Amino acid sequence: MTQYATVDPTNGRLVREFATISDTEVARALDSAQAAFLTWRETDVEHRAATLTRVAELHREHAQEMAELMTLEMGKPISEARREVELSASIYDYYAIEGVDLLADEELKVNGPGRAFIRQAPIGALLGIMPWNFPYYQVARFVAPNLLLGNTVLLKHASSCPQQALRIEELLREAGTPDGVYQNVFASSAQVADMIAHPAIQGVSLTGSERAGSAVGAVAGQHLKKCVLELGGSDPLIVLPGVDIEHAVSAAVAGRFFNGGQACTSSKRIIVDTQVWDKFVAAFVEMVGELTMGDPREECTQLGPMASTAARADLAAQVDDALAKGATAHVGAVVPEGDGAYYPATVLSGVTPQMRAWHEELFGPVAVLYQVGSVDEAVALANDSPYGLGGAVFGPDPDEAARVADRLDVGMVGVNQVIRSAPELPFGGVKNSGTGRELGRLGLEEFANKKLIRTP
């Protein structure tokens, strides 16, 4: 039987296990979600908004406890974990405060008498499939807009963070969501496929790997279900001549090594013009070498363990492949001895198309630096990727940097800043990075019936 389990990544020890639910429990959850939808959609939107406000309050009241669970289950440094809880709370707040206006009817210009408008209506029960790397934030950006809209949610969280999954369900219940409106399900992969196919489920949202997105998208397409897929990324960060080196290096280090580099929007490919290459590399390597790796429970820790030893092994294999084929490691690249899933902050250069690191996503604390001789070369390299999630351009002239940014084949791009999530800003990518958007107004519309109403 598939197990959901808490395994402490600092030492590899099993803390607690949870069994998957039975097929009977899956059927019961689906029935409950459908029944709850029939009443939740009729609840005043102001009441739904007030529920989200209470969810945000509970996140803040229990922030330290929630952060400690995150640190236990996936190794995030405690200070970063608290910031994630706060970001999650701000998402619930955003939809509670702005959501009513965002759902207002949209008047259309019509030729002839009468009027026409678009009303956003809920579509039913939804299935969310969420990852381990941002275990509260990823849930919030899917759940908040859809509960406000009037949809109900079944949430299948990552198998490595079951205690956080249960805590989220408890907080939603404490906030006053009626039975069936939000349900955690410890489902197996086969049960997930069956749930997507079930008539009660009207849509599915997945944040995860490209492989998982392909599998879920195939099942959703087969059964004509709407899906939103937020998948991998290999985000470029372009450094133009004349840039403020100190600012660009600081932003690039933060953009790459936040969350241990285990983020789809990490600045994984740092593309530097030859005119500033030497200064940038020297400063970047120095700053990376100063990152503090250690116990994620300690406030001073900047880099905790990776989420699992299996993930570390995959990353180490990608790095070893690059080194064996001629890449240079400026710092790091050696798996430390001892317990846990620790991997040092690593900087590579000299990566070529023959290496796995050229086209594969490096999901961990490894930065790859590329030297280019022109803006056109930088843009071509940035776009030479199967992914298209985010990106950034740093330069002395913001207008010039913005023109370069506009040439990138990505869903999000920052000018003189790396992409960071905010409740009001849409999040999503193109190419193999997925389909659809989350957060902001666009996130509220993904699982809405944009119903045309025409009156005489």
Image (cartoon, rainbow, N blue to C red):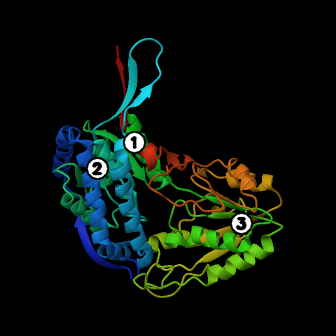
Q: Earlier in the sequence, mark 2 or mark 1?
A: 2
Crowding at label 1, few (<14), some or many (≥20) Cα neighbours within 10 Å?
some
Residue behind mark 3: 351
Q: Are marks 2 and 1 in contact (CB under 8 Å)?
A: no
Nearer to us in this view, 369 or 284: 284
Q: Quadrant of the N terminus?
A: bottom left
Q: Residue furthest bottom?
A: 338
The tag earlier along the polypeptide, 1 or 3, is 1
Camera-side mark, 1 or 3: 1
Q: Which of the numbered marks, if any, corresponds to residue 311?
A: none
Relative to 333, 106 lies left or right: left
Q: Which mark is residue 49?
A: 2
Residue 77 visible in the shown view: no
Amino acid type of the residue tagged 3 in the rendering: Val
Q: Which residue is at the front of the view, 313 or 168?
A: 168
Q: Are there few (<14), some (14-19), or many (20+) residues within 10 Å of tag 3? A: many
In the rendered view, does 40 fall on the left or right side of 357?
left
Location of mark 1 (residue): 102
**Which of pointers 2 and 3 indicates the residue nearer the eye?**
2
Residue 390 image offset from top left, x and y in percent: 58, 55
Residue at 25% x, 38% y is: 200
Q: Looking at the picture, does residue 125 appear above or below residue 69?
A: above
Residue type marked 1 = Leu
Residue 61 in picture, x, y percent from top left: 28, 71
> Regarding mark 2 in the picture, which secondary structure is present there?
helix
